[in-house]
Each structure stands twice: as structure tokens, then as C-alpha cells.
Image (tube, rainbow, N blue to C red):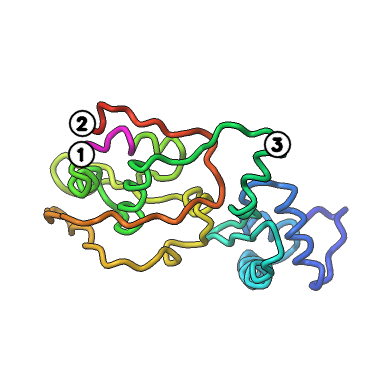
Amino acid sequence: MDNNIEKLDIKDVESAIEAILFAAGHPVTYEKLGEVLDLFEAQVKKKVKDFAEKYNADKSRGIMLLAFENSCQLCTKERFLPYIKETLGIRRGGNLSNSSLEVLAIIAYNEPVTRAFIDTVRKVDSAYVVNSLCEKNLIEACGRLDVPGRPNLYRTTPTFLRCFGIDSLEQLPYIDIPRAPAEGEIIPLDIVIPEVPSTENELPNSDTESPKSEE
């Protein structure tokens, strides 16, 4: 903590957190908040979790506080998106295509998974969609499966949680979906892809799929 910054009373910590997140406009780590507020990281994380419960319980607010595993952020509620777009003159949307939502659902409910697993579920080549989602930082490679060829394993990212307005994957709706295969195991699948919750924040660019990837 900077020696020139006055130490806050504990009752002012929540207000300080709100002010910092509002000004930042992006996720801020608990570690950074702890440095600034002269608190341990674990203390800040608990404070934010408790604050988020009270903050989000107020239905009159136009913004919500998302508490992720390692960071937190303020974001606008989806219901006010049309008014925000009209006020700011935003004409282009950034909604995800159905193909992208399918792939995200498969990964979110089974992660980590390989692209071959995704292709098996969708019964179509998903290379373009997977690459597109990686570029948008909604999914990421998180290792390799220990089988011949050592294919990449994919999982969702904190950006995915932020865009869908949830704190963790545990908040996704429960569905009865086949598990991901064990190492080296192949499971034939014939399932209906679950409907993914609408995003709380639109993505910066629209997702136009390549026809070749869906043939």
C-alpha cells in the first residue's frame, strides 16, 4: 500500500471496492485490491463475496458485481443493453452464433475436452469455431491428453464467466449430460445440446462462421 494513501476504516472498504471496479471497467484481482486496501488477499475475496450477495440482491440496480475465482468486476445487466446501445450509438451486435453456443455448452459441461470430443458430439468439424472462441478468449487450451497425437484439451475462461454473468460453472443450469471420456476412452454420443444462458455483456465482434467448417 502506498504510504500516501490513508488507511480506510473497515466500513469504507466495500465503497472503495465499488469505486475501484467502477473506474476500472475490467476484472481486478483480489491480490491487487489487497495491496491497495492493505488487506490479505483472502480477506478481500471474502469481503467481495459477501458484498456481491448484498449488492446483487438489490433488483433496482442497473449493474451487478461478479466475484470470480481470482478477480471481480462490475458489469451492466442484460435487460438494459438496448438502452445502452441506443445511448452510445452502438449499431453492431456481438452476439455469438448457434455453432459457437453449442461448442461453449459442450466445453462448459464437460471440460476439459478435446476438439475430437466436440466434433463427436456435434457430428461436424468444429475447428473454425474452436479457433474463433480461442481468439475471443472464451476458451483456452489447458494441456494435452496423454494419447497418441497428444491433442489439446480445452476449458472455459474467466472471460466466459464474465460474459455469461456467472461467478463459476456451478451456476450453470443442471442437465443430464454424458460425461467426458476418460483418458484414451471413446464414447459414442447422441445428445441434445443444452440451451446456454444469454450473455450479460455482448462480445466485441460478431461471430460469422465459415461454411467450410460446418460441411
Q: Quadrant of the N terminus?
A: bottom right
Q: Which residue is mark 1?
A: 124
Q: Amino acid at mark 1?
A: Val
SS class, disc 1? loop
What is the x, y in percent for residue 21? 70, 53
Whichever of callouts 3 and 2 sits on the residue coming sooner in the sequence is 3
Mark 3 sits on what residue?
88
Q: Main secondary structure of the magenta part?
A: helix
Q: Is residue 75 magenta?
A: no
**Residue 97 or residue 64, whichever sits in front:** 97
Inspect this view and state whether residue 88 appears.
yes
What span is in magenta?
125-129
Q: Is residue 185 visible?
A: no
Q: Amino acid at mark 3?
A: Leu
- Quarter of the figure that contains the C terminus: top left
Please name the residue that numbered disc 2 is placed on. Answer: 215
Report the residue at 35% width, 31% height from top.
Answer: 209
Q: CA distance from mark 1 to mark 2?
A: 7 Å
> For the point 85% across and 56% down, which residue is it?
5
Q: Earlier in the sequence, mark 1 or mark 2?
A: 1
Q: CA distance from mark 3 to mark 2?
A: 38 Å
Q: For the residue carrying disc 1, how many other residues have a C-alpha within 10 Å: few (<14), some (14-19), or many (20+)? A: few
